[in-house]
Image (spheres, coloured by chain):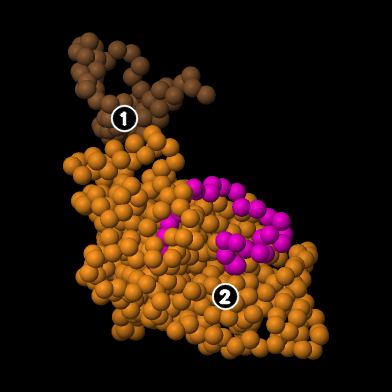
Chain colours: A orange, B brown
Amino acid sequence: MLQTYSYPEFPYVQPPEQASGQLVRKTAVVVGAGPIGLTTALDFASRGIPVVVLDDNNTVSIGSRAVCYAKRPLEVWDRLGCADRMVDKGVSWKIGKVFRDEEQVYQFDLLPEADHKYPAFINLQQYYLEEYLLDRAKDFGDLIDIRWKNKVVSLKNNADHVRLSIETPDGIYDMEADWMVACDGAKSDIRSMIGAEFTGQFFQDRFLIADVVMKADFPAERWFWFNPPFHRNQSVLLHMEADNVWRIDFQLGWDCDPDEEKKPEKVIPRLKAMLGEDAEFELEWVSVYQFACRRMKSFRFGRLFFAGDAAHQVSPFGARGANTGVQDSDNLGWKLKLVIDGLAPDSLLDSYNAERIYAADDNLKNSTRSTDFISPKSPVSKAFRDAVLDLANRHSFARPLVNSGRLSSPTPYAVSPLNTPDSDSFAGKMLPGTNCADAPVRVNGADGWLLNQLGDGFTALYFSADGSVPADLAALAGAPVPVKTIVVGGGLEDVKGLVTERYDGTPGTVYLIRPDQHVAARFRHFDAARFSAALNTALGKN
Amino acid sequence: MSLILTPNIPTPDDFYEKLIETHRGLTDEQSRDVNCKLVLLLANHIGDLPVLEQALAVARDGYE
C-alpha cells in the first residue's frame, strides 16, 4: 500500500530505575501515548506536574483513526500551545450533507456563529495529531518523560500510591506513582487489571474504514449516504483528510467476515463502485471495526483515574471519542495540581468523576441514538428510519429527524458540585458549568481572542463602565489560589461587542472562570464574600 | 395540554373509512411503511413531547 506518511520509530531507552534497580516514586504516571495520554501529559507539565508516559509501542497511530477534531479540543490544545499546527495541516469543514439513494435529503452547518478563533471541525489523520503533541512535549524537557516499549503488566492500587510492574525489552521493573491516569484505549489493560468493567451496549454491525489516496473534487464536507447505489442497503461516510487522503467508511452489516473484508481485492471493488471504474486511487490503510456505547461505572479509583476510550467508548458517528477524551484531560489537570499543592481538598478530584461521567452519558446518549438510526436493530426500527428518509426528501419537517451522527460539542456541566447556581438574572448561554465562548478582543493594541486571555488559572472576567476594578477583586491576584482579573472596558477591548453579547455583560458583571475555561459562577455585582464562597465551591470545599 | 382520549373527530366513520382505504391494495410491508409515515406526520403536527409520550404509553399499554 502507498504511504503518504512515514511513521517515526521512537527509540527505546532502558529506564534508569531498571538499570539501577532502584524503586522510584513518581508524581504522575500516564499510561498510553495516544491523543488523550499525550494531552494529559501536556496539561500536567504545563502546570508543573512532572509526568512519566508509558507506552507499549514505539510509534504514532497507524491509520487516520479518530480523524475529526472539534472546536473545543482545539481550544484545549491552543491552551497547551499546539493547536495552530493542527489547523494548518488539517482540513477545516463545517458543512455536512446526507444523501439517500442519489438525492440529498439533509444538510447541516456546524458553526453558524462567526468570530471564534477555531473552526467547528478539522479532519486530520491521528498520526499527525500525535506527532504534533509529541513535538510539543519536547518543549517541556524533563517534565515529560516518555518511555516507549514500556508495557504495564501488573499494578497494585494502594491507598496513597499506585505500584506498577512494567515490562521492557530489558525485562521487568517496578515503579510507584502518587497519581496515575490510564489512557490506554477501549481495550484498556489497566481497566482489566483492577477488575473494573464496561457496561452498556455492543452493536451487531461492522464498518470498513479505508484511507484512500486520490485527487478528487469532493468538497471539504462530511458526506453521508444511506443506501447509495454503489453500496445498497448500507451506509457510507466520506471525509477529506490532509495530503489528498480521503477517509471512507462502509457499513458492512453483521454477517461479514472482517478478515476477508480487509483484503484489497475486496476493498478495491467497493471503492470502484463508489468512485467509478476509471478513478485513480491508492489504498493507504484499511481496518474493520465493530462499535459499542458503554462506560465504566466510575472513572476514579483512589489515586488512579481513567480517561478517554479507556473510561468510555462511543460509536464513531459524531466524532465523540477523542474529542470528549481531550475534555477529560482538560478537566483533570488543574484539579490534580491544586490537590498536589495542598490548595484544594481531595474531594475536588471526585468532581472529575461527577463532571466527566455526566459528559460521557451525554455522549453515550447521542451516539446510541445515531447508531439506532444508522444501524436499526429491528425491522420496525428500520421501517421508521426509512420512513424518515422518504419523507425528508420532500418535507422539511422530517429532516431534523435524520440522524447520521450528532457531532461532538462540549457538554455543559449543568449539575456540577463546583457550580454556584445563578442568583442574578442573565440571558444567553454562559450558564455555570458551561465552557467559555470565544470572541475577538484587543489587548494593548493587538488583536487577539478572549480564550487566550483567560489562560489556565482562575480568572475573573469583569465588565467595567470606566475601566476601574473593585480593589477586593484586584487583590485576589495575590491570594493563595490566585484569581487574575481581566477587564472588559479596561485592559480588554471588546472590539466587536461580542464578549458583552455572549456573556450578557453589564457594568459591574463579574464571571468566575475555572482553569479549564468553564464558568464557575457569575454575578451582576462583585461582592467579596459571595465571590470567595463561589471560589471555594469551585475548589471542592463545599 | 394532555392527550385527548374522548371523541374528537366529528365524523368518525368517514375517518375510519379513509384510514382503511389508504391501505387498500398494499402489501403488509407497504402498509407498515405507510403507518410509519403516518405516525411521523401526525407526531410532527402535534409537536408536543409530553402529549406524544402519553400517546406512546397508551398505544403500548397491555403489551409486556
Q: Is residue A89 left or right of residue A217?
A: right
Residue A360 is covered by the magenta coloring: no
Q: Are marks 2 and 1 in contact (CB under 8 Å)?
A: no
Q: Quadrant of residue A78?
A: bottom left
Chain bearing tag 2 is A
Q: Which residues are magenta?
A: A183-210
Can residue A472 be seen at all in this image of the molecule?
Answer: no
Residue in view at x 46 percent, y 49 percent: A254
Residue at which label 1 appears: B29
Residue at which label 2 appears: A33
- Quarter of the figure with the N terminus of chain B: top left
Q: Find residue A266 and report its horizontal and vertical position in percent.
A: 39, 62
* Front disc: 2 or 1: 1
Q: Is residue B35 left or right of residue A20?
A: left
**Looking at the picture, which amino acid does disc 2 mark?**
Ala
Q: Secondary structure at mark 1?
A: helix
Residue in view at x 36 percent, y 22 percent: B3
For the residue pair A517 and A23, the one nearer the viewer reads as A23
**Looking at the picture, which amino acid does disc 1 mark?**
Glu
Residue in view at x 54 percent, y 80 percent: A59
Q: Find residue A13 and report its horizontal and vertical position in percent.
A: 66, 88
